[in-house]
Amino acid sequence: MINPATVFAELQTLAAGANVSLSGRHALISEDTPAVRLSSAGWIDLTPAGLIDVTSTELLYGLALEKIMTRISPFSKWVRLFVERYFAFMAARITSLDQPDPTSEIYTREDWIFSTWLPLPHAQILLPPESGQDEPAFAEFDMAFWTGNRLVCVLLAQSGMMLKSKRDKISRLEHSHPQLQIVSVPREAVSDAKPDFPGDLFGEDFINFWRDLELPQGPSPSPVLASAF
């Protein structure tokens, strides 16, 4: 896992106006920031050479999922299970959408998967500085999502009492971020005995991620889509 203070220090040294809103190491989010989706530019860092053999939506999706998984600690069983079940759940949701005209060259129903919210694992949220504070402080979560109007922060399978220092930082974030939603997912909801994603904990706006979109947003190996977005 990357030290968030190191990333914060690196961002401070970048030239003003540099386009650094999203990368594989950070996301800069304000109330005006568009939703961070699987299709958002910057986080996956694909090169043209890396896309040569990607000839289908399925291959591109698999590559994106692999990129996310590589950023999860190998010891974080619950985070891995959560991400796997999240995408399986969202893929199943897509099957309820209308299938486009079979002759359409613009998109298929499966392309909607790229419009899902991008999971940000092991999220460290920068806190507003307090008086006398010299070093940056961060509230720690297992996962975060930005939907364009809500910062959804996830705590997974908490057992026992949370450390006071961690609890205090989360409390500071709650008081300073009006668009915050904290979702605590109990261990039984992500256990091997219950393989379904707990969508009911996140709300209708979250699980119906396509509601404010007319067409899927996302990378595609299709030349038609590449020129349409």
Image (tube, rainbow, N blue to C red):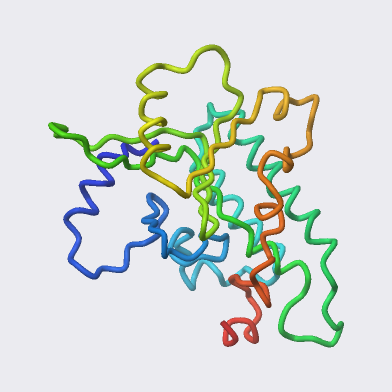
User: Which residue is rendered at x = 47% and y = 67% of the image?
Assistant: 41
Up/down of 51 relative to 207, above or below: below
Q: For the N terminus, which image quadrant?
A: top left
User: Which residue is rendered at x = 82% and y = 67% of the image?
Assistant: 97
Position of 224 with respect to 11 (left or right) is: right
Q: Position of residue 131 (x, y in %)?
A: 16, 34
Q: Position of residue 68 (x, y in %)?
A: 54, 48
Toward which corner of the image does residue 57 lie, by quadrant? bottom right
Up/down of 69 relative to 157, above or below: below
Position of 98 with respect to 164 (left or right) is: right
Q: Position of residue 184 (x, y in %)?
A: 59, 31
User: Which residue is rendered at x = 44% and y = 62% of the image?
Assistant: 45
Q: For the C terminus, which image quadrant?
A: bottom right
Q: Position of residue 139 (x, y in %)?
A: 38, 34
| Foreground pick, 215 / 111 | 215
Position of 68 with respect to 139 (left or right) is: right
Position of 148 with respect to 205 (left or right) is: left
| Foreground pick, 170 / 22 | 170
User: Which residue is rendered at x = 63% and y = 82% of the image?
Assistant: 225
Toward which corner of the image does residue 116 lie, by quadrant? bottom right
Toward which corner of the image does residue 84 lie, by quadrant? top right
